[in-house]
Image (cartoon, grey):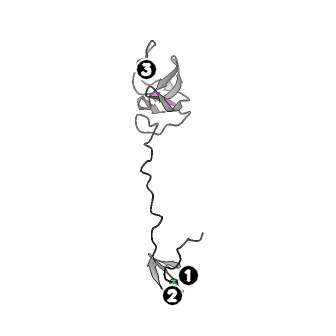
Amino acid sequence: MSENLPPCPECASEYTYQDGALIVCPMCGHEFEETTATAETTDAAEAAPKFLDAVGNQLVDGDTVTVTENLNVKGGAPIKRGTKVTGIKLLDEPVNGHDIAAKIPGAGQMYLKCSVVKKA
Ligand SMILES: [Zn+2]
């Protein structure tokens, strides 16, 4: 792998080489520091981590999780803490703030929040 060093700013020679922190031109003897034209681009707009479970584990599609608290279900039996849910599906577009779709034993297809489950 050859490093892509900048040409000498004095004589424009391309035969520069790295010597410690400096770049040295063997043609004219000029030594210079590499200008950091490629400054590290920290992506400020980096998306906040999504789909983290109650303890901060990254969840992925198809994960098996357990419910960490008793959940009331409108018009149905509550989902008990510790209920195991297999094959979760993560929703890029949350439904009413719920970002997991899953089939829950005894409850059927439901939406959950990542914050109330823990990766099994
Ligand atoms: Zn030079």
**Judging from the image, what secondary structure is the residue with disc 1 in?**
loop
Residue 66 drawn above or below residue 24: above
Residue drawn at x 42%, y 23% as measured from the top left: 81
List x then y, in percent, for residue 80.
43, 20
Q: Could you give the CA–CA distance between mark 2 and mark 3, rounded to whole angstroms?
A: 77 Å
Query: Could you tell me the amino acid type at mark 2?
Result: Cys
Magenta span includes 93: no
Chain part drawn in magenta: 63-71
Chief secondary structure of the magenta portion: loop
Q: Could you give the CA–CA distance between mark 2 and mark 1, rounded to whole angstroms?
A: 9 Å
Residue drawn at x 53%, y 77% as measured from the top left: 7
CB of mark 1 near ligand 1 (< 8 Å): yes
List x then y, in percent, for residue 105.
53, 20
Residue 9 drawn above or below residue 102: below
CB of mark 2 near ligand 1 (< 8 Å): yes
- In front of the other: label 2 or label 3? 2
Q: Quadrant of residue 69?
A: top left
Residue for badge 2: 28
List x then y, in percent, for residue 40.
45, 60
Residue 90 drawn above or below residue 106: below
List x then y, in percent, for residue 88.
53, 30
Residue drawn at x 44%, y 35% as measured from the top left: 53
**Judging from the image, what secondary structure is the residue with disc 3 in?**
loop
